Structures are given as structure tokens and as C-alpha cells.
Amino acid sequence: MKHCLSVLVHTPAHSQVAKPLSYWSEQPLAPGSLVRVPLGKRELLGVVWDTPDEAQAPNPPEADKIRPLAGVLGGIAPLNAAWRHLMNFSAGYYQRSVGEVALAALPPQLRELSPLQLARRLKRHASAATQAQNSPENATDLVALTPDQTRAIAQFDADTRPCLLFGATGSGKTEVYLQCVQRLLEQSPQAQALVMVPEINLTPQLEARFRGRFAPRYGEQALVAMHSGMTPAQRLQSWLAAHSGLARIVLGTRMAIFASMPTLQLIVVDEEHDPSYKSQDGSRYSARDLAVYRARLEGARVMLGSATPSLESWHHSRPANEGGRYGRLTMASRIGHDQPQDLGPASPSRPRHGLPLVRRVDMTHQPKHCVLAPPLLLAIAERVARGEQSMVFLNRRGYAPVLHCADCDWKSECPHCSAYRVFHKIDRTLRCHHCGYAERVPRACPACGNPDIAPLGRGTERLEEHLGELLADVRSPQGEPVRIARIDADTTRLKGTLASQLAQVHDGTVDVLVGTQMIAKGHDFRRITLVAAVNPDGALFSSDFRAPERLFGLLMQAAGRAGRDAEASGRSEMWLQTAHPKHPLFEALKQHDYPAFAEQQLRERAQAAMPPFSFQALVRAEARTQEVAQGFLSAASTAASAMPETEPWLARVTLYPPVPMSIQRVADVERAQMLVESASRAALQSFLAAWHGALHATRSQAAGRGLIRWAVDVDPLSI
């Protein structure tokens, strides 16, 4: 007897094949089973999907067109109903095809392996699992907790809602995560926990702590990592361990939110404010938001942790009588300091215990063209002389952002993008950070022949060089010259270099660390007592309404790298070089007062009806010309206005005119965007679902004129 199955395959949202396809099978297969199916001349990985009642069998005239399965990936249990529900929700909410979302969530190597090859892998996996289960040793005892940590864990256990752990940098949030995971695993022998971090370079650091705590008790295989830096074979092995239940703990970046974990009971999202949790391609999902949804779907608990929470999470964690949907757990003091008796918002302007003193340097009163203010330079020299470390933060890599000719005003523009190529002195190249185009630095101005072309502005490479010149006469307590290191995307290209550089910082062989946001968050630098932000003013007056939130979070996270050792915290400092020292953002930062900053920002957003008081989506279009890109968006807007006025949600949605993106050309492709906004999330979702067909039809008409692609970005983080 033949059975008709609905099978999902990886198809883009723009494809005409965006729904499950029908195939014959000689045997009945449960929904969630993994299979291989023919599609055209190719053979693809597929997932047997739930079939609506009215479509159990194909219509008789089409029965002959249905092809049989190419194979079944036996040995892997079907993906459960909760996982399939999560895929359906993600596809619907973020306006993508469910096949694209579901198949992208599976390990890439599954798409390549035949049933026979997979059977061999599963045999090796089972052998390793048996060996791991026989190897655990006695675990170490729990570490002593601070009163803040004890209180936070008790409140988390008592509150069944999603919880926001609002803890100062160095207050011990990671230990709270460890304790919650350990208690869960002890209470339930089958329970699984998912712990997410925003960036790959933070995963090994956290993995070492989790492995040291849990490997002796549950075995090495009980903890696996998931991130894009792993090889395909490693990702498959981790996925199989999580799917089979062998892995009790999964540590990963945003991709881990889609991991198949049949007995998931706890989700932890560390640094939940980080924009890295929002994907910028494909389905453009928010792993943080999906974590909250998945926890509710599977009856699991979820903890969001941050010293500078996103304003959305902070707003949701307001008191329940004001409409809050999250619980708020507060840890206001660093480990090793007396705990404040009142942890609530009654006295938010009080400086947090153990956090560095914030000093603002008014650059309008410093010598002209000064890069580092003399008082700051003196403070760094004093730290070096005492054997302490300093960190200088500048969120711009390269030697200089642009090369400039003073005679004809030529600048190093990228020929393929509407951006400048960055000057990298170390390899004498001009490199575009958007499309990757690079070439050697010209000997003279290409426009007028002037040999005196000069760098304009500063990046971390030039700042490192400048610091070396200014601190040339400074000596460490051992009489050695100052040792300066730089950590950014340029110095960490090769595998293993980041870990090597961080090890040098931790063991004290570096006196001054220069870097971008890579060093500003997540790292536990015990020897750093001074952090300096060289040029933080750029985001103060940005057109992006989220820019102040990102700047405050980044500076507060950077400040948190100083004074993490309790003995040195009394002399730890954060220096801010700014031309606007009285700006409210810096006033709040001086007091380490995130609640005051959040209150002011939320008040402004409420007045302007911006998120979290409204809901947004961006429709982005890419074409060979700006006219075609904006023309597509204008036609889509016209199609939306032609929708029946009887739809109740139509009047609650506002479409703004299409405009070029801030960087409107990348790799010779013009980009435009159109904002869609509503005060109701349900109304926005209903509109986008109804509008999807019109977007497809509009694309078909515009494709011949050079339209390349379009995408909908729900809940965008940058506009």
C-alpha cells in the first residue's frame, strides 16, 4: 500500500514552490521524519510535515505526477510536534516559507549524507555516547552564593513568567545561570537546558566554565556547543546529541534556538540586549524573542540576562499592575562588595557598588587635534607603572576610515558601494568593509596626482600606533617598555588568534589593550583597572532612534571590564572623551544608572509612538538601479492601498514612502527600504500576511526591469 506524505524541502520564500510537496511512500511515516526526496534533477533533504485533513490524498488526476521518496533517514527519531510548531510560527511571523526556516535549522551535513552514510555516523555516535555515559566522576560541590544571587534564584523559582535578570557587570550572572541549570538537571534526570550567547568569541569562555562544572557529573557528551564557527561534522554531532537527549546542555549562538531538544525545560539568553541575536539575512528572526515564545510553547522556563537590557525587555519587566509580562530579578552589586539593602528602583541614581568611577573629559577644553587628552594619557601611564592594565576602546577598525587629498578633495570611495574604503596601514591596502573590494594604496592622488594624500580620522590600528609613540618613555615595574596589543576583526582573522591574544591579556603580558566592541563585553579581565572610550559622540545624534540605546549599552558594558577584581575595584575608572559632557546619556552613565536612562528613552519613544509602543516591519528591495528598487516598493504600496477597506486591520497600518538605505549601494546593487508601522502587532501581522501575495505579484512584474530580490524584516533593529 502506498502512502501520500507532505514533505518540506528547502525552498526560498520567493519560489513558486513554497509549501509542502506530496510524495509516495511504501510505509507510513510519522510527521517530523527525515527523508530524502527527488526535486527536478536533484535529491534533497526533506521533513515529513503535518498534513491538513482536507489534503490527505492527492486528487486522482494528479496521482500519476507524484514521485516516490528517495530514502528514509532511519535511526533518527522524528522531530517532535513542538519543534514543528516553532518552525510554523517562525515562518509565519517573519514572513518566510516554512521549508526555508525548517531546513535551515537542520545541520548542513544532513543534506549531504545518504541513509547509508548516516547509519555509519549514528553507529559511531552511539559508541561515543556509551563510552561517555560510563565516564562521569564525582562532581564538585556548589560554590557559595552572594545574597544577591540567592535572592535572584529564589525569585526565579517562585515566578513562572519569563524573567529578566538585571545584574551589574561583575555581579555574578553567569553563576546564577550555572546554579539554575544544575538545579534543573538534579531535579529531572531527562531535562535539557539551552544557554545562548550573542557571539562566537564568547562561546569558548562560557563553555569552559560550564564544562568544568558539569562534565565531572554528567560526562563530556552531556554538554555540546552550537555555532557557525564549527565544522559541519561537529555541528551534526552536536545536533544528534541534543536531538537524542544525550546532551543535557546546549551552548550556542542565535542558531541554537532552533536546536531539536525534546525535553527542553530551561532557556537562558545571556546579554539579551545584543543585536547579534537578530539575524540580518534569511528569515531575519530574533533568537531572543523566539526563546520567550519557545519556552511558553514547551512549558519551559526562560531567563534573559543583561546589565543593560533592551528597552523592550525592560518595558515588559515593569510591575505587573502596570501591564508587565516579565519578572525582574535585580543584582545591583559586584561580587566582593557589600550588598545594598534596597535593590529596587526607589533610588536609581545611586552609584552601583564596586563599579568604576566614570570621568568625563571635555575635549573642547583640550589641545587642538588632541587624540588622547593629557589627563587620560597620564592616568594610563600611572596604571602601567603600577603593573595594572588599561583598555582603550574605539569602535572603528583599520588605520583610518578614509584616505584624503587636500588639493582636489579626492577621498577613497569604493567604486562598488556608496561608502569609503578604509585605509589599512599594516598591509598598505584600501579595503571596503561592505563588499570586500581591496587594492593597494596609490602612490599619488588618482584624481590630481598629488603625492601628499593623507589618512583622515582614526581607527584602532592608528590608535595603537599613536599610543606606542605617546607611551614610548613609560616603563613597567620591571623596567620594560609598555606592551600594547590590539584586538579587532583584522587581528583575529586566523583561527586561534583570538584565544591566544586573550590569553596574553589574562596572564598580564599586555599593559594596554586597544580594540573594538569585540573586547567591550563578555570578557572577565581581572587586571584591567582603567577603560577609556576615545570617540563615543558619533551615535549621540544618529538618525536611528535605537542609536542611544546601543551606545549606552556598549559604554556600560565596556566600563564593566574595569575593576572586576575586588581588590582593584576601588581605583577602577572609566574615561569618556566627549565634546558633550553634559549630555543626559553621559549623566546617566556616570551614575551607572540604567533605570534612569531607560525611563528617559521610553518616555521619548512613547511620545513618538516608537517601539516598544508600536510595531514595525521593513520591506527592503535590491535592484540594479535605485529607480527600480524604489519603483517596486511604490508599486507594492499601491497594491496595499487597493486592499478591501472592509478589512478591520487595514486602517491601523501606516506605510511610509520608500527611501534609499543609509548605505544605498553595496557591491553594485542599489538598496531601498519602506517602513510599515502599526500600534497593533496583530494588525501588522494580518496586513503582512494578506500583502504577501501582492508582493509576489509585484516582483513578477518588476523582475524584467532588473529587480534582484526583496525581503520583509519584521521588528527591525536598524532603520
Image (cartoon, rainbow, N blue to C red):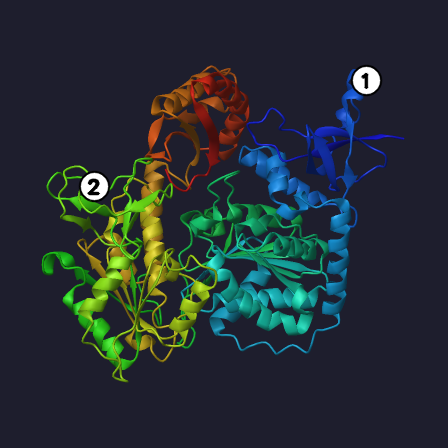
SS for callout 2 = loop
Mark 2 → mark 1, Cα distance in angstroms? 67 Å
**269 lies above or below 436:** below
Badge 2: residue crowd in 10 Å (few <14, some 14–19, many ≥20): many
The foreground one among 638 and 1 is: 1
The residue positioned 45% from the left and 50% from the top of the image is 276
Say if mark 2 contacts mark 1, CB within 8 Å: no
The foreground one among 246 and 236 is: 236
Q: Earlier in the sequence, mark 2 or mark 1?
A: 1
* Residue at the limit of the structure toward the bottom, as seen here: 478
Residue on which disc 2 sits: 411
The residue positioned 43% from the left and 74% from the top of the image is 335
Q: Quick check: 277 left or right of 32?
A: left
Find residue 60 and name its label.
1
**315 lies above or below 611:** below
Q: Amino acid at mark 1?
A: Pro
SS for callout 1 = helix
The foreground one among 51 and 458 is: 458
